[in-house]
Image (spheres, rainbow, N blue to C red):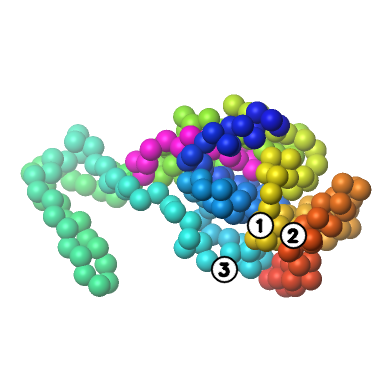
Amino acid sequence: MQEAKNTIINAKSIYLIPGESAEAISCTLALFYTLKESGKNVNLVLEDLPESLKFLSPSLDFISYPKNFVFSIPESVAKISQIYYEKNPDNFKIHLTLDSGVIKKDNVSFYFTELKPDLIITIGVQDYIKALSERLDQYAFLLDSPILNIDNSPANKNFGKINVIAEKSLAELILQIQEKNNKESAKCLMTSLVDYTNNFKKGLTAQIFQIASDLIKQGADLNEINNNFYGRE
């Protein structure tokens, strides 16, 4: 755990990748908020929030997605002699003039060319390659970066440079790594606990009740969470 803390402290550029569960996404948002507040360059690999979690972040516009895009066409498919673009209020078009060959949709690939981050943190992801399998064209630049793997499933593949795996709530694991919470982070962690315990009906321990109490003191409103989380499913 101390190694995980030190790795986060020393990293300047971090990508967060959540699993598909509400528990994992909520914990990832919690970590996102605290890392942003500490001055880290943080990116979140998440296309959209489930309806039941949109109250945790009304918009994802504040997340800095990769910005360097590349369109690639193999030279063996077609030889391009000219290229120009057209921009208007409705759209942006790239025009190509071919000397030879034929370009089909399958010949064109699209990907990001961002600098590799110092660290990738996965939360609630059992198999890293499987989780990114449909997005490797966009996020292939992440593959060689060191990974901090946080999960509570015994089926986890232990794919990280550092693996923090324990059969307890993800919120408990996150709280062992981040010592301070702001109000947004506290609300996200409480939402994660609500999902993990089925609204405090299963998997309960003294530690979970203590964490819930602390999160309420830090600004998490359980009534607000229940109304939004269960009201939007």
Residue 88's image quarter?
A: bottom left
Q: Residue 46: where, in percent of width, then height? A: 53, 53
Residue 94's image quarter?
A: bottom left
The answer to whether residue 188 is visible is: no
- At mark 1, the secondary structure is loop
Tell me how far mark 2 sits from mark 1, CA to CA: 7 Å
Q: Is the C-beta separation of discs 2 and 1 under 8 Å?
A: yes
Residue beneath disc 2: 218
Tell me how far mark 3 sits from mark 1, CA to CA: 17 Å
Amino acid of disc 1 = Asn
Q: Residue at x 46, y 37 (%)?
A: 117
- At mark 3, the secondary structure is loop
The answer to whether residue 161 is visible is: yes
Tell me how far mark 3 sits from mark 2, CA to CA: 21 Å
Q: Give the quarter of the figure containing the N terminus.
A: top right
Q: Residue 129: where, in percent of width, then height? A: 54, 35
Q: Residue at x 32, y 47 (%)?
A: 68
Q: Residue at x 49, y 39 (%)?
A: 12
Q: Residue at x 54, y 33 (%)?
A: 10
Residue beneath disc 1: 182
Q: Give the quarter of the figure containing the C terminus.
A: bottom right
Residue beneath disc 3: 58
In the rendered structure, the answer to whether residue 37 lies left or right of residue 192 reads: left
Q: Residue 112: where, in percent of width, then height? A: 36, 44
Q: Which residues are magenta?
A: 112-130
